[in-house]
Every structure is written in structure tokens, then in C-alpha cells.
Image: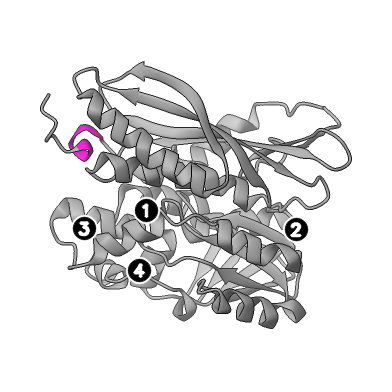
Amino acid sequence: MEATVGLTSLARAGGCAAKYSAARLETLLAGLAPAEVEDLLVGLDPADDAAVYRLDDERAIVFTVDFFPPLVDDPRTFGAIAATNALNDVFAMGGTPLLALSVMAFPEELPVEVLGEVLAGADERVRAAGAILAGGHTIRDTEPKYGLAVVGLVHPERIWPKAGAQPGDVLFLTKRLGTGLVLQAQRDGVSPEGALEAAVDSMIALNRAAADAIRPFEPNAVTDVTGFGLLGHAHELASRSGVRVVIDADALPSLPGAFDLASDGVRTGGDARNREFAGPHVESYAAAAWEALAYDPQTAGGLLVSMPSERAPVLEATLASEGLLAARIGRVEEGSGVLFH
């Protein structure tokens, strides 16, 4: 196999679009009894962005694993995106990453230099997160896959769950939407000029800075927007919290070219799976293109933050002053489900 072979040609689906169907995952996990351990603060009941285990009154471990097939051809960029996506789960729980291990599956025919570039890209992002890439595990596979198992720390009383949103909260999103649409358009050969570069820049941007800025404001609920799309993750936040989430379509921030691609009918395979999962719980009055953007599976997406309304203006100003996106996209009400209009 030549070194010039594009990594994406070896994958059936790339990035978070390769995630197992959320609807099927719910069925699968429904048969597993959660461990009844007092110090397991976050596990399967309900599931969240990572598991959390209390060590003592001041420290809890945040533990996550995330990996997927390549979504870009450049191996260093692939490693950086996969690492960012995994590290962001720790930030989404309010934690700080400490240690990471590589999870790798690659064809033996690929030149070892390709694997080295993947690891180099991952290592750079792990270091930027303040953590250490300390080892890993590699197996042979016809389809390349890469990701990380990450351990971090959080104070047991400062965990950011999906389950804490309160009526009266406002909702913020810290990254633009549309990575799945742009990547699909790139595969189809119809991606607008500069769209892929903007999407890559977004996908390798850690949520560390946003999490650090948000932490002093003590948000009620936080999750990161990844493979289940904005509406899928909003549905999880609403159902876990026992509230109704209202999202304003016109307020959604999109990557360059993403909304036009949605208007032109570009869709990923994950779009249908996300609609199957969240659609029965979403009351939508938005145009088809906005729906496509909101169901689009994101890779290494931003934080969806539910914040008491009285703290929102200062948070918004704080994020903006640090050059971070602070898109106010909706609110939380009494009730259930998601209203998208």
C-alpha cells in the first residue's frame, strides 16, 4: 500500500458520523444494570459524556474513551482531530485531562511513517490540553481507526452533568455547526473553497479555553455536541433534566459554506440516524436546511451550556473578550422535549 493512499479511502464512514446509532445504543444499554457503587458519581444511570469516580472529598476521576475512522486524508490532522474529540469529553464534564492512551487499529500495509504522523498530531493536542500521552494499544485492521482513552480530574461537587438544566436557563453554543456537511461535500467533490480548512480548524480546537471561561459561572448543565447532532444532544439534555429545550434556528452559528450545503441537499449517513433517535422528541417548525444543520453529526464540536439567565450576559461578554464563540441559541422551559423553531 503506497503512502500516497488517502486514509479516507480506507474508511466506510469517518469521524463521529461513524458512531453507532443512538437509538440502537439506548436499546443496548437498557439491558445493563448500573453498578451500585457509592463513589461512582456518573455511570450508565444516566449515561453522560464520561464516567466519574470519586477518590475523596476533593478529587474525582473523569474517564472516557473515543475513537473513529479517518475523516481527512492527512494523518497528522486525523490524529489531532481524534485526540481533540476524546479530550473534549473531559472538558464537557468540567474536568481537566491528565493522562491519555492511544487506541489504534491500522492495516499492516500502511507505512509506519503514517502511523507516526497520526501519533504526532494526537500528541500535540494532548500536550495543548495539559495532559500526557503515555502509551496505548494497537491492533491490525483493514479499516484505520484512532482515538484516546483519557483520564482527568474534577472536584466531586463541580461536575457538569447533562441532567442539571433548569427552567429559566439560557443556552449557549461555543462552536459553529456543520462539520459533517462539509466533510460529506468534500467526499462528494462539491465543498466550497475554504470550507474544509475552516472545518478542520474547528475540529482541532480544544474546548479547554471555553471550559476554563465557563467554570467560574457554575453552569447548570453542559454537554459537548458531537455525533448525535445538536438536536440529539439537546434531546439528551432535556430528557435527563426533565425540562423542555427551546432552540432558535436563526441563532445557530454555522461553518462557512455549511448552511448553503444543507440548502443544496447535502446530507450525511448520520443525519437519518440522528433523526430516528431525536426526531420523535423534537417539535420542529424550522426550514429543512436549518433542520439538516441541527441534525448534522459533529466531530469535536463545541459545548452546549445551560446557564442561569442572570449570569448569561457576563458569561457572554467573558467568552467574547477571549475571542471565543458565545452563541445564545435558546432557553430552557418547564415541560419536556425539544422545540426547534
Depth-wise, is mark 2 or mark 4 nearer the camera? Answer: 4
**What predominant SS class does the magenta segment belong to?**
helix
Could you give the CA–CA distance between mark 3 and mark 2, rounded to whole angstroms?
36 Å
Q: Pointers 3 and 2 in contact (CB under 8 A)?
A: no
Closer to us: 23 or 14: 14
Question: Of discs 3 and 1, which sits in the foreground?
Answer: 3
**Quarter holding the N terminus?**
top left
Q: Which sits in the foreground, 13 or 82?
A: 82
Q: Which residue is mark 2?
A: 164
Question: What is the C-alpha distance between the residues marked 1 and 4?
Answer: 17 Å
**Mark 3 neighbour class, 10 Å CA radius: few under 14, some 14 to 19, many 20 or more:** many
Are there few (<14), some (14-19), or many (20+) residues within 10 Å of tag 4? many
* Residue drawn 71% across the image and 41% down it: 153
- Extreme residue in the right direction: 57
**Among numbered discs 2 and 4, the one appearing first in the sequence:** 2
Q: Nearer the viewer, mark 4 or mark 3?
A: 4
Discs 1/2, front: 2
- Residue corresponding to mark 3: 185
Tag 3: amino acid: Ala
Image mark count: 4
Say which residue appears at 43% left-offset and 38% top-offset. 123
Mark 2 → mark 4, Cα distance in angstroms: 29 Å
Q: Say which element carries label 4.
A: loop
Q: Say if 302 sits above or below 274 in the image.
A: below
